[in-house]
Amino acid sequence: MTRNLRGNAKSMRHWPTRSEGRLWTWLRNREFHGVKFRRQVPIGRYIVDFYCPELKLAIEIDGRQHDAVWMSEHESERTVEIERHGIEIVRIENELLIRDPRTVEDILELAISRRRKR
């Protein structure tokens, strides 16, 4: 991990998106099912939005920029590299978090439950 990557992660922690801030209020201090999450964690060459080392579970908040054609290839490469570390990635769309937080909560509960059982 490079210094630059760590610096970028630190900067991202100081300037979260609105959706990241909203989700962090749920995840911080083991408030969500007693699971410890960290924000903006470098993994390999990439930074994940939220990460639980105990469960090897990453949560990514995807905004509209992820709809761009060029992002598809980038995200595929990124996903492959992160999954090589044995990490499961749960992707949540910004719009879903805003429109239906209960569904997001259900998705995260299911992911945590699955990872605990492995």
Image (tube, rainbow, N blue to C red):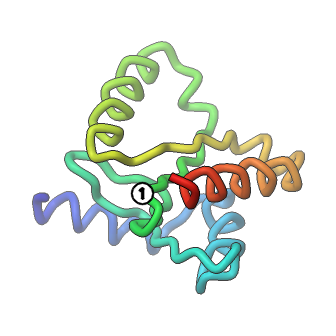
Q: Position of residue 112 (x, y in %)?
A: 62, 58
- On the image, which quarter does residue 102 sit in? bottom right
Position in image of residue 60 (x %, y %): 53, 48
* Above/below status of 29 relative to 97: below
Provide residue 48's location: percent of width, then percent of height.
Answer: 41, 53
Secondary structure of the residue carrying tag 1 is loop
Q: Residue furthest left?
A: 2
Direction from residue 116 to residue 19 in the image, left or right: right
> Is 27 situated above or below 80?
below
Where residue 107 appears, as percent x and y from the top left, is 74, 48
Q: Which of the pair 34/69 is nearer the observer?
A: 34
Give the residue displayed 54% in from the left and 52% down from the top: 59
Relative placement, left or right, of 113 versus 76 is right
Name the residue located 61 percent from the left edge and 82 percent from the top edge.
Answer: 30
**Residue labelled with disc 1:** 56
Q: Nearer the viewer, residue 113 or 81?
A: 113
Name the residue at 34% across, 46% down: 86
Mark 1 surroundings: few (<14), some (14-19) or many (≥20) residues within 10 A = some
Dividing the image into 4 quarters, which one contains the N terminus? bottom left
At 46% from the left edge and 72% from the top edge, which residue is drawn?
38
Relative to 40, is 22 on the left or the right?
right
